[in-house]
Image (cartoon, grey):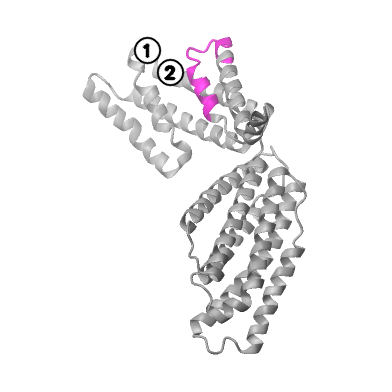
């Protein structure tokens, strides 16, 4: 029973999406039969396609589906009534004429990617369907419009999921991955153990950034269409990208271990800073995921201050005078990177707080 509860809690978003999709499919089929549409299949398929993880995603899928359907149905119907298809050669030419311009349109604007398929659906069956191409095109538009209305309606009223939740989960995942990254980087700097798994960690961060970008687009669409009054998602996304850039800068400075004397002097403050950065990021991730109060940054600020004081002491002692210029530059680049990270982590907590309060 406990395992089942844990599964339901972890997969609550996916289960809600599956339930909404099932309801939308059944409702679309029922309404299609109620209004006596010739083929309810396209209404059901469209309702399934429209159903996305968030309301903003459903709105985009609906707009894309409608744009592609209108373009494909109208152009396919026009080709059907304009081109004589007496044989296979003529039909093949009609197919090329129907698909070519719409394929270009889809390549230029991905919103029209279903247009070539819709044109073929309208074009090919009309010779044996017993109805005019125009009537067939209108039937497809009617069925797909019904599927769009049902899909968006279910997304809006049945266990609605706003893109804000997707954005919060993506931001939380990024925070956790960045905490792992900080630990790997500082361990390689002071321990000289190399950086195993670093490439895979960066790949997961890039993938999560793409997920966050999609969530930001969906959240912004909800705001534009007045389906949500949550805070603007862009500031949080920009701050997470700045944190990413800070860690890239720090990573470059951590490419090789510090010189022995410098490394020994900075081991304790760097270890403390590593632990506090990782803890702050993981606490922020937990707060975002569970909608808890965000952590304060006092312990992190104290660890950063201790690190800066240790750097100033080394400089006052002249410990870096005998080092090559590139080593000195790397040491101070590391300091600058952590100072920038401190500013951006403070901003991250503020932007996450805005999202939580909206």
Taking the image as shown, residue 40 lies to the left or right of residue 126, namely right
Q: Secondary structure at mark 1?
A: helix
Q: Secondary structure at mark 2?
A: helix
| Residue at (48, 17) in percent of width and height | 41
Decide which of 265, 73 is in the foreground and name it: 265
| Label 2, residues with CA under 10 Å away: few <14, some 14-19, many ≥20 | many
Per the rendering, the mark at residue 221 is: none
Of the two numbered discs 1 and 2 on the same chain, state the one appearing first in sequence.
Answer: 1
Q: Residue at x 34, y 21 (%)?
A: 124
Please report the residue visible at 39 percent of the width from the left and 19 percent of the height from the top. Answer: 133
Report if residue 332 is visible in the image. Answer: no
Q: Which mark is residue 136?
A: 2
Q: Picture coordinates of residue 117 (x, y %)?
A: 39, 29
Residue 129, numbered label = 1
Q: Is residue 167 above or below residue 50?
A: below
Q: Nearer the viewer, residue 37 or 251?
A: 251
Q: What segment carries the magenta color? A: 31-49
Pointer 1 and pointer 2: residues touching (CB < 8 Å)?
Answer: yes
């Amino acid at each position: 029973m406990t395992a089942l509860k844990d599964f339901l809690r972890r997969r609550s978003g996916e289960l809600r999406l599956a339930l909404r999709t099932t309801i939308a499919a059944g409702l679309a089929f029922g309404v299609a039969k109620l209004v006596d549409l010739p083929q309810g299949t396209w209404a059901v398929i469209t309702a399934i396609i429209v159903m996305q993880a968030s309301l903003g995603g459903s709105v985009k899928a609906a707009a894309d589906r409608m744009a592609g359907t209108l373009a494909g149905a109208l152009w396919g119907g026009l080709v059907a009534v304009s081109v004589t298809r007496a044989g296979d050669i003529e039909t093949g030419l009609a197919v090329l004429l129907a698909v070519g311009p719409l394929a270009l349109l889809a390549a230029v604007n991905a919103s029209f990617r279903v247009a070539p398929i819709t044109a073929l659906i309208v074009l090919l069956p009309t010779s044996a369907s017993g109805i005019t191409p125009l009537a067939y095109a209108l039937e497809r538009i009617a069925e797909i419009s019904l599927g769009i209305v049902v899909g968006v309606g279910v997304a809006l009223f049945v266990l609605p999921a706003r893109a804000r939740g997707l954005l919060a989960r993506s931001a939380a995942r990024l925070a956790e991955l960045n905490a792992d990254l900080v630990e790997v980087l500082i361990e390689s700097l002071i321990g000289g153990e190399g950086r195993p798994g670093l490439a895979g960690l960066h790949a997961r961060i890039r993938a999560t950034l793409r997920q966050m970008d999609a969530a930001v687009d969906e959240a912004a669409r909800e705001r534009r269409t007045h389906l949500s009054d949550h805070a603007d998602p862009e500031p949080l996304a920009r701050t997470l990208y700045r944190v990413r850039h800070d860690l890239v800068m720090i990573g470059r400075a951590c490419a090789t271990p510090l010189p022995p004397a410098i490394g020994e002097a900075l081991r304790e403050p760097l270890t403390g800073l590593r632990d506090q950065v990782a803890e702050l990021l993981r606490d922020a991730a937990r707060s975002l995921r569970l909608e808890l109060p965000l952590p304060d940054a006092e312990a992190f600020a104290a660890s950063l201050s201790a690190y800066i004081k240790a750097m100033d002491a080394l400089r006052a002692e002249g410990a870096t005078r005998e080092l090559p210029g590139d080593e000195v530059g790397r040491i101070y680049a590391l300091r600058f990177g952590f100072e920038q990270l401190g500013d951006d982590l403070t901003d991250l907590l503020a932007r996450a707080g805005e999202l939580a309060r909206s």
